[in-house]
Image (tube, rainbow, N blue to C red):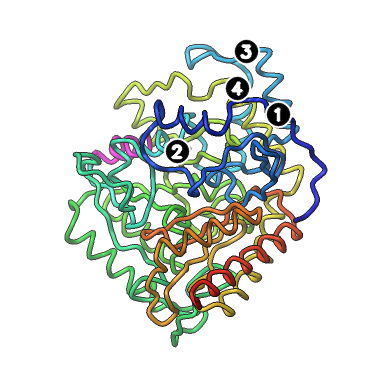
Amino acid sequence: MPPCDFTPEKYQSLTYERVLEIHKQHLSPILTAYFPKPLLLHQGHKEWLFDYEGNRYLDFFSGIVTVSVGHCHPKVNAAAQKQLGRLWHTSTLFFHPPIHEFAEKLSALLPEPLKVIFLVNSGSEANDLAMLMARAHSKSTDIISFRGGYHGGSSSTLGLTNVGPFKTELSSGLGCQSTMCPDVFRGPWGGSHCRDSPVQTIRKCSCAPDCCQAKDQYIEQFKDTLNSSVAKSIAGFFAEPIQGVNGVVQYPKGFLKEAFELVRERGGLCIADEVQTGFGRLGSHFWGFQTHGILPDIVTMAKGIGNGFPMAAVVTTPEIANSLAKSVLHFNTFGGNPMACAIGSAVLEVIKEENLQENSQEVGTYMLQKFAELRDEFEIVGDVRGKGLMIGIEMVKDKMSRQPLPQEEVNEIHDDCKRMGLLIGKGGIFAQTFRIAPSMCITKPDVKFAVEVFRSALIRHRDRRAK
């Protein structure tokens, strides 16, 4: 494990057993905690987390792709502490400079005409508001999203979310329609030149590097959805530039560009969900939509915007913002509160001052290539994909069938990584994909350690199979 010059404070709070007891009695019964013995965390520093016993872990999932510049970054901490002593809350009824300072900084990072910002508190809130905007502007109802897409857990956004465990038998998401995800590894079409990534699938194709037959096939499926499942005029289309919860799924190059054109022909708006992909995480560009050469009508963002502080935003054009204003008196009590905006400004400054986007590109590409070597070594590693510091490792029974590795075996590998000091995420329709999305401050020595831990966990899995 790489060295760390930080010593955590001594833990002096609830016992582990008491935490479990309180959780069982008073908190949600929905099982979301990782590992048979859930981690009780105490403190964080940069890319490191410490549990109540003082054990150190390399955090390669950053609070579900949220801690963008590192745990408890000193500049972000200082900004929060300064604002905490000045003014916590104003609501939108009164003005306070940090709100306007943040709005100016954020708008400078987005292309024209995306210059009007609505501040909210979470990704679900942001996408909920974007749905309302699209319908208010288009005067239509139907909204399309990909199967495998995750856009939130509110009663409205659950209609956009198409990952099985998050769906409900109750009525939700009126007017939402799913369409085939253009997944070039697990889907019916895919080849060796499809993705905007240093690592391609192991599937072969006869396409030239600048031509993708898989993209054309998936576009035909998208057209079929437009022709058969929605009205002649639609409200919009939501897409993550890279799917996060579904296991870092990338689409064929050029797909979103053509899909956006088809949506606009129907009068719909195109919404880029940058909750996980934004703020330089993908390395080559600050926003995920830029990697596709597209310009959305609405952009939603959260998670990394506040480095873990509850904060989100919807950015759109003046024309669309005015359509919303004519339709409804939109109000959000805590959206754009002084604390969030002071923190948001500090996060943007750290990303620039510490060249974290460039670090995402350099270290992320290095990591992708190292994990790709494990794909070549182990039969159960079916696919390695991603861009910058957003990486997916899809586990399979074997490369020929591409059938997902059973969840019990995935969980064993996941737990082995934790025991060796590495925390990673899981995703995919069958929870078969490991998600790698560390804070953007990580280093190549961190990557070397993570890859070696993951390789050791795969060897342990192979040994268990052999027995």
Q: Residue at x 48, y 24 (%)?
A: 335
Q: Is residue 237 magenta?
A: no
404 relative to 313 in the view: left or right:
left
User: What amino acid type is highlighted by mark number 1?
Assistant: Asn
Q: Residues within 10 Å of mark 3 (few under 14, many from 20)?
A: few
Q: Position of residue 151 (x, y in %)?
A: 38, 45
Q: Quadrant of the N terminus?
A: bottom right
From the image, tell me which residue sits under label 1. 77
321 relative to 81 in the view: left or right:
left
Q: Which residues are magenta?
A: 129-139
Q: Earlier in the sequence, mark 2 or mark 4?
A: 2
Q: Is residue 193 visible?
A: no
Q: Earlier in the sequence, mark 1 or mark 4?
A: 1
Q: Residues under labels 1 and 3: Cα distance? A: 16 Å
Q: Secondary structure at mark 2?
A: helix
From the image, tell me which residue sits under label 4. 339
Q: Position of residue 350 (x, y in %)?
A: 72, 39
Q: Residues under labels 2 and 4: Cα distance? A: 18 Å
From the image, tell me which residue sits under label 2. 123
Q: Residues under labels 2 and 1: Cα distance? A: 23 Å
Q: Residue at x 33, y 68 (%)?
A: 219
Q: Residues within 10 Å of mark 4 (few under 14, many from 20)?
A: many
Report how many numbered discs are placed on residues in the image. Answer: 4
From the image, tell me which residue sits under label 3. 87
Q: Residues under labels 1 and 4: Cα distance? A: 11 Å
Q: Residues within 10 Å of mark 2 (few under 14, many from 20)?
A: many
User: What amino acid type is highlighted by mark number 3?
Assistant: Leu
Q: Residue at x 38, y 30 (%)?
A: 322
Q: Are marks 1 and 4 in contact (CB under 8 Å)?
A: no
Q: Residue at x 27, y 55 (%)?
A: 178
